[in-house]
Amino acid sequence: MQNNQPHPDIARILVPEDTIQAHVKVLAHQISRDYADVDSIYMIGVLRGSFMFLADLVRQINVPTVVDFMAISSYSDASESGEVRIVMDLHEPIVNKHVIVVEDIVDSGQTMSYLYHTLKGRGPASLRTCTLVQKHQEYVSVPLDYLGFNIPDVWVVGYGLHYEGRHRTLPYIAELKETVYKK
Ligand code: 5GP
Ligand code: MG
């Protein structure tokens, strides 16, 4: 059932749908310009959170793209052990390819840093990063070449991002009420 009221779990909308869509266009334009001379871009979506962003982004890029995915161990696993691990790897080698890794959100930067160094070690022709949102600018040790939005340090959902599997399909990025995630 559709209506215009945000879901009761939502505290406030941080990035409205039209703002996301406008910025996806800007990022796609920058990428199309930066890669105008390459045969194709190998776009890697980090599952599951980036699926919606990647789908919108690649449809606005006017250079040929190949889409592939990786899945990384969940946030709760990683924060306990302090390590990040690949649970699903790429379909093809990336040697000599122009690679952009597309993330939903960069928080501590641990996941993006792990991905960056792992992919770099596989010998791509070039490697850049793209993330829709970033929480902590101070932590990140790898370049975020294409960035959507900086947001405060709150738990966000929507546009691919979830809380316990819910709210992924909201068209905007919203702050979850603390009462929902600090039970
Ligand atoms: P890292 O701390 O390694 O930068 O982020 C790890 C992962 O945690 C992100 O890729 C994302 O999947 C998840 N994450 C971090 N903050 C949030 C958030 O506010 N909402 C959601 N849904 N996921 C988050
Ligand atoms: Mg992620």
Image: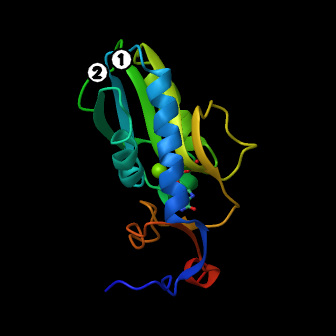
In the displayed structure image, the side of residue 164 where residue 173 appears, left or right: right
Identify residue for label 1: 97
Question: Which label lies toward us, 2 or 1?
Answer: 1
Residue 86: image quadrant is top left
Q: Residues within 10 Å of mark 2 (few under 14, many from 20)?
A: few
Residue 32 percent location from the top left of the image = 44, 28
Q: Residues within 10 Å of mark 1 (few under 14, many from 20)?
A: some
Q: Type of residue at label 2?
A: Pro
In the displayed structure image, the side of residue 32 where residue 174 appears, left or right: right
Q: Nearer the viewer, residue 115 or 132?
A: 132
Q: Residue at x 35, y 51 (%)?
A: 51
Separation of disc 2 and disc 1 at Cα?
A: 9 Å
Residue 94 percent location from the top left of the image = 33, 20
Q: Residue at x 29, y 35 (%)?
A: 67
> Tell me, what colour scheme is on the image?
rainbow
Above/below status of 2 relative to 108: below
In the picture, which quadrant includes the N terminus?
bottom left
Residue 89 appears in view: no
Per the rendering, the mark at residue 66 is none
Classify the position of ligand 1 by quadrant: top left, top right, bottom left or bottom right. Answer: bottom right
Check mark 1 vs ligand 2: CB closer than 8 Å? yes or no.
no
Identify residue for label 2: 93
In the picture, which quadrant includes the C terminus?
bottom right
Residue 42 appears in view: yes
Q: Nearer the viewer, residue 142 or 167?
A: 167
Residue 149 percent location from the top left of the image = 62, 51
Above/below status of 13 relative to 123: below
